[in-house]
Structure formats: C-alpha cells, structure tokens
Image (tube, helix red, strand yellow):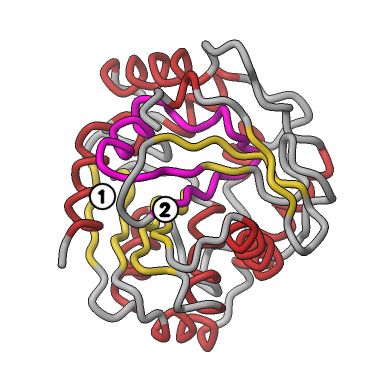
Amino acid sequence: MTRSYAQAPITTVSAANGIEYAYREVGEGGVPLVLLMHFRGNLDNWDPALVDALAQSRRVIAFDNTGVGRSSGRTPSTIAQMALDAIAFTDALDLAEVDVLGFSLGAFVAQEIALIRPALARRVVLASAAPQGAPGMHGWAKWVIGAVGGPEIVPASVLDVFYTRSPESRSAGEKAMGRMFTREELDMATTWQTRQAQYDAVAAWGIPGFSLLERVTAIQAPVFVANGDSDPMILPRYSHLLAGLIPGAEIKIYPDAAHGFLFQHHDQFASDVAHFLDRQ
C-alpha cells in the first residue's frame, strides 16, 4: 500500500463496542503508527505531506474516533472514554501493538491509551500536549476557543491559532490547508455535539490537580514530546512539564511555530518521529 494520503480512500471497520469506525491508511511495514486527531478535526485535517512522510517506511493509520466524521455513535465527553474507544478501534483491526502519535486533544487520548493498555503502545509521540491537572490548563484562552470553537469554522481564524504571524509560518499554514482539502472524497464535517463533548473533555482534563500530574509517571513506553515555540493553545511550558514528568521522555520545540508546528515543519517533524520510532 503506497498511495498518497491525499488519494487514500475512506474505509470502515466494525468494532466490538458497536461503533463503525472510518479510517484511512497508507504505507506498509513495521509497527503500525496510529494517529489521534485534534479538537474538532476529522480525517481531512491531517496534512498529506506529513502523513506521506511518516509513511515512507511504515503503515500509518488515521481514524475518526466515536461520533467524529463518518464514524458512528456519539462523541464521549471524557478523555478516558475516548481512549477506550480508540483501543476498541485497534482491536477491530487486530493490532496487538502500535506506535501512537497524538496531536493536541489526541495527545491527551494517547497518554490515556499508554496508561490503560501499556502493552498496546510501543512508542508514543505527544504533539502539543499537556498532562492532566496542569495549573492554568482549565480551558483555552478566550480568543483561542473563540477562533476554533464557534458554530462555523473560519479558516482565517484557525490559521491565527495554528501558525504565527510571520510570513513564513502563515504561508506554510495556507499551503497545508490547501493540501488537506484538495481531494475528491472528503470526510463528513464534525458536528456541534462533537464540539461540545470534546471541549467538555478538554476542560475536565485541565481542572487543576497536583496529584493528577503523577499519573503520567507510570507511562512505560518511550515518549517523544513536541510543540511549537509560540503555541497559544497548548503553551510550550506544558510540554516541558509533561516531558519532565514522564520518565526518560524526549522533547523538541520547533521555531517560529504555533499549534500547527507539525504541518509547518512536516519534513523535519516526520524525520524526528521516524528517528524516534526506529530507535532500538
């Protein structure tokens, strides 16, 4: 399977929890890499340039979790249930071991997967991530949720959160958006129910609790934490906090980049992820 993510069809699989999951996959070989999407995102919100770079030497699978896009059911309002639903998806594909790349909300879910079923997650990449209970993480800044959380998604407002104001970053963001949505078969847009449930989960995750910070110290898998140096949604200090709490975790902060650093720096990020995943 060598087709580009931009040409990959949407496939479905029925899981034991009664959910029919929609997914796309590219690449082949190695331990499969499962991608976990950000707030309100669906299969189309993965940059094909990033996915194709990740899939050069491995199978890469992106999917809509419960209630998202073309997947059935109602989106749950807790990170823990999202993690259980993601595990049900991997079970449906008979995947006993995977690498996991979670982005933003997906990085919260990835942490839970690594805690709930340690044997499933061989290696974990946490992009724009924060640990549960971190002080100051109870909801996003008003202008941020205003930009990405309204009834209608406005591309220009999303660019303000995902990219910096520099001409280089903004141009990279516009190119990434162009790559994402120039395909014949688009996913279904996420619903308002998904928006509400996901932001409830984000807010609950961010309720301050110092004892909750200890949870990630139990993660056994090797972890790579990454972020942009100007991310207004998940501030870089939370990525540093997370990397400091997880034993042996590595961290990299990408320059002149905001929440969408992994799309802006897709070649470098994919190379860094491949180096991390291929390490013995």
Instruction: Report whether 65 appears left or right of 116.
Output: right
Residue at (34% x, 54% y) in the render: 236
Q: Quadrant of residue 264?
A: top left
Q: Which mark is residue 98?
A: none
Q: Which mark is residue 101?
A: 2
| Number of marks in picture | 2
| Camera-side residue of 126 and 222 | 222
Residue at (63% x, 17% y) in the render: 185
Q: Quadrant of residue 45?
A: top right
Q: Earlier in the sequence, mark 2 or mark 1?
A: 2
Residue 270 appears at what percent x and percent y?
Answer: 26, 40
Q: Is residue 234 visible?
A: no
Residue bearing the label numbered 1: 273
Residue at (17% x, 52% y) in the render: 275
Instruction: Report whether 183 appears left or right of 64.
Output: left
Please say if 4 is above or below 80. Answer: above
Residue at (52% x, 50% y) in the render: 36
Q: Quadrant of residue 57?
A: top left
| Mark 1 burial class by Cα count in 10 Å: few <14, some 14-19, many 20+ | some
| Camera-side residue of 1 and 149 | 1
> Are the residues tagged 2 and 1 within 8 Å (C-beta)?
yes
Report the quarter where the N terminus lies.
top left
Disc 2 is placed on an element classified as strand
Tell me the kind of residue under disc 1: Val
- Residue range corresponding to the magenta coloring: 32-61
Disc 1 is placed on an element classified as helix
C-alpha separation, residue under disc 2 versus residue under disc 1? 9 Å
| Mark 2 burial class by Cα count in 10 Å: few <14, some 14-19, many 20+ | many
Instruction: Report whether 10 appears left or right of 231.
Output: right
Please say if 52 is above or below 253. Answer: above
